[in-house]
Amino acid sequence: MVVGGTDIRFVKDEDFDNEIIWGLNEYNKPPTLIYPRPRISGKKNGRILTSLDDDAMNICLAKENHEDILIAMYDKEKVFRYSF
């Protein structure tokens, strides 16, 4: 279930192409990185998780160095892979 509308937007030099969005994205989930997200690939309880899933993004935020996440947000060659 998508909630939408509850977020904080960080914009560099009023260039909306250079925007980072952090906030509430899914019902009953903690605040997370909404956009742009790094590429994420993994499985949890037989379910495939990708960058589109808040669960995958929250695991990435907990496990990875935040500088590495920032770089991967814009370098689409980088993929964080997990096995849950």
Image (cartoon, rainbow, N blue to C red):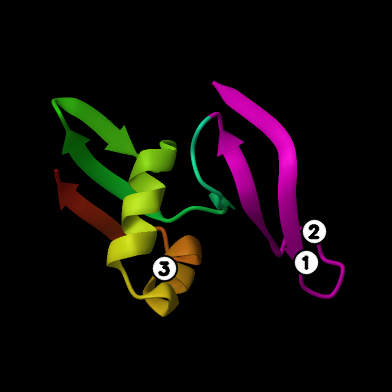
Disc 2 on helix, strand or loop? loop
Q: Position of residue 78 (x, y in %)?
A: 32, 62
Q: Is residue 78 visible?
A: no
Foreground mark, 1 or 2? Answer: 1
* Disc 1: which residue: 11
10 Å neighbourhood of mark 1: few (<14), some, or many (≥20)?
A: few
**Rendered residue at 48%/62% (across/down):** 73
- Tell which of 6 and 38 is nearer to you: 6
* Disc 2: which residue: 16
**Rendered residue at 36%/41% (across/down):** 55
Q: Is residue 81 visible?
A: yes
| Magenta stretch bounds | 1-27
Q: Is residue 24 left or right of residue 74?
A: right
Evaluate if marks 1 and 2 touch, with contact meaning CB atoms under 8 Å apart.
yes
**Rendered residue at 15%/28% (across/down):** 45
Of callouts 2 and 3, the N-terminal one: 2
User: Is the stretch drawn in magenta largely helix, strand or loop?
Assistant: strand
Q: Position of residue 47 (x, y in %)?
A: 21, 26
Foreground mark, 2 or 3? Answer: 3
Q: Position of residue 60 (x, y in %)?
A: 33, 57
Question: Quarter of the image containing the C terminus?
Answer: top left
- Tell which of 54 and 40 is nearer to you: 54
Of callouts 1 and 2, the N-terminal one: 1
Q: Which mark is residue 69?
A: 3
User: Residue 15 magenta-drawn?
Assistant: yes
Disc 3 on helix, strand or loop? helix
Disc 1 on helix, strand or loop? strand
Q: Position of residue 61 (x, y in %)?
A: 39, 61
What is the C-alpha distance between the residues marked 2 and 3?
A: 20 Å
